[in-house]
């Protein structure tokens, strides 16, 4: 069973619920990206480690082996929602649904899961690192807390019912699936987000990265190009993080450019920048950009990333800025001389 929420398909396609199977297959996912990514799923690096447990579904009383992903143990009682049951102190990031009845969230976790939590709590300050269990909490962008990834999904789908045209909100859902180890659902949702807003920078970045990883270089370059074209207006991220994120995309673009024997251009053309309504303004006067690019050394891409950030780069503290713009000063000097005469 593909473990897909019929509500997701309903939200994207707006089909009547009765037309959607209770346990949809990947073929039922709208768009083309989900299928393409699903065929190449194992090539995509996951955000969270694999972590399998035999879990019992209380809705149908049947057991199955599921990838629960990262276990996050909240030992700080104050930051937990009130009336938390003791067994609700460990969140899991993996997105999984019952293989038998496709329900989600109604789980009876096995004893070895509780052992893993205990081990995580005891070992958290020991040098032996277990990447499958950490202390902390996971909250959504609106501050809400959810026990299972599928609970968070329901919450976001509720919000999307109210605001179906909010591309940023769709991108939050895509992020949740990505952390949940479901790149095919991520791609499906991002494809939809871009049909609402083709300049959704984060959606472009993630798709660029996916297609790069599965070797679809032209598709990857196309998404990264739009990532750059939309960067100067994107205000949803902290600027320092945003620069690093753009540098990562630029690094991939550079690698794609080299791998395609320079057939795929490294940067968007001036025409496409103007089409995107990018006001190059003073940047046109840049006489020399004094930097060298080194593949996989992301900091070497910071100056270029700052260039695409446009006026957003002014929010980076001065000392941390890496782009030095030397505007052609000749004109000014001449005027100055003339005045002297
Ligand atoms: Zn079940």
Image (cartoon, grey):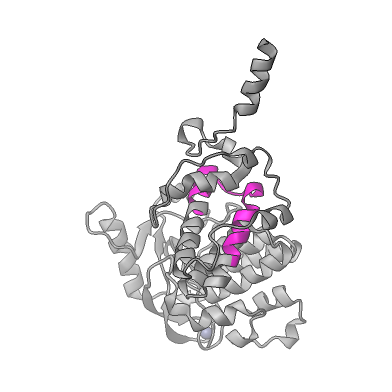
Does any portion of residue 148 appear in the rendered image?
Answer: no
Q: Position of residue 16 (x, y in %)?
A: 77, 82
* Image quadrant in which the C terminus is located: top right
Name the image quarter holding residue 17.
Answer: bottom right
Which residue ends up furthest to the front in the rendered image?
Answer: 341
Residue at horizontal 41%, vertical 74%?
109
Name the image quarter holding residue 51.
Answer: bottom left
Does any portion of residue 208 appear in the rendered image?
Answer: yes
Tell me if residue 298 comes above or below residue 109 in the rendering.
Answer: above
Left or right position of 20 against 41: right
Residue at horizontal 46%, vertical 55%?
137
Residue at horizontal 48%, vertical 80%?
40
Q: Position of residue 104 (x, y in %)?
A: 55, 77
Residue at horizontal 27%, vertical 57%?
122
Residue range of the region highlighted in magenta in the rendering:
222-245
Q: Position of residue 26 (x, y in %)?
A: 58, 85
Which residue ends up furthest to the top in the rendered image?
Answer: 341
Tell me if residue 24 comes above or below residue 255 in the rendering.
Answer: below
Left or right position of 69 against 238: left
Q: Position of residue 171 (x, y in %)?
A: 62, 62
Which of the pair 87/116 is nearer the observer? 116
Which of the pair 130/214 is nearer the observer? 214
| Main SS class of the magenta portion in the image | helix
In magenta stretch: residue 292: no
Tell me if residue 288 comes above or below residue 253 in the rendering.
Answer: above
Figure disc tally: 0
Which residue ends up furthest to the left in the rendered image?
Answer: 127
């Amino acid at each position: 069973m593909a473990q897909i929420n019929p509500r997701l398909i309903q939200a994207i396609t707006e089909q009547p619920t009765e037309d959607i199977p209770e346990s949809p297959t990947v073929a039922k996912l709208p768009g083309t990206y989900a299928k393409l990514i699903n065929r190449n799923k194992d090539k995509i690096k996951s955000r969270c480690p694999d972590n399998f447990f035999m879990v019992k579904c209380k809705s149908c009383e049947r057991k199955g082996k599921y990838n629960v992903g990262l276990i996050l143990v909240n030992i700080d009682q104050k930051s937990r929602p009130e009336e938390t049951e003791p067994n609700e102190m460990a969140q899991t990031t993996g997105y999984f649904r019952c293989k038998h009845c496709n329900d989600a969230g109604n789980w009876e976790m096995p004893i070895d899961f509780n052992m893993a939590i205990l081990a995580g709590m005891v070992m958290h300050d020991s040098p032996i690192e277990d990447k499958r269990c950490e202390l902390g909490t996971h909250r959504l962008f609106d501050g809400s807390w959810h026990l299972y990834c599928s609970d968070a999904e329901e919450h976001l789908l509720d919000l999307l019912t109210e605001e179906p045209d909010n591309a940023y909100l769709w991108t939050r859902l895509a992020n949740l699936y990505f952390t949940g180890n479901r790149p095919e659902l991520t791609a499906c949702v991002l494809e939809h987000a871009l049909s609402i807003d083709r300049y959704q920078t984060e959606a472009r970045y993630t798709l660029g990265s996916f297609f790069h990883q599965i070797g679809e270089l032209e598709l990857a370059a196309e998404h990264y190009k739009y990532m750059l074209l939309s960067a100067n207006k994107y205000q949803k991220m902290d600027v320092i993080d945003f620069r690093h994120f753009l540098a990562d995309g630029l690094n991939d673009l550079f690698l794609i450019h080299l791998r395609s024997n320079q057939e795929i251009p490294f940067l968007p053309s001036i025409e496409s920048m103007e089409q995107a309504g990018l006001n190059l303004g003073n940047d046109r006067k840049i006489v020399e950009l004094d930097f060298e690019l080194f593949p996989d050394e992301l900091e070497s891409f910071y100056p270029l990333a700052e260039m695409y950030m446009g006026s957003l780069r002014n929010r980076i503290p001065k000392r941390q800025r890496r782009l030095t713009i030397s505007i052609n000063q000749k004109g000014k000097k001449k005027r100055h001389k003339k005045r002297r005469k």
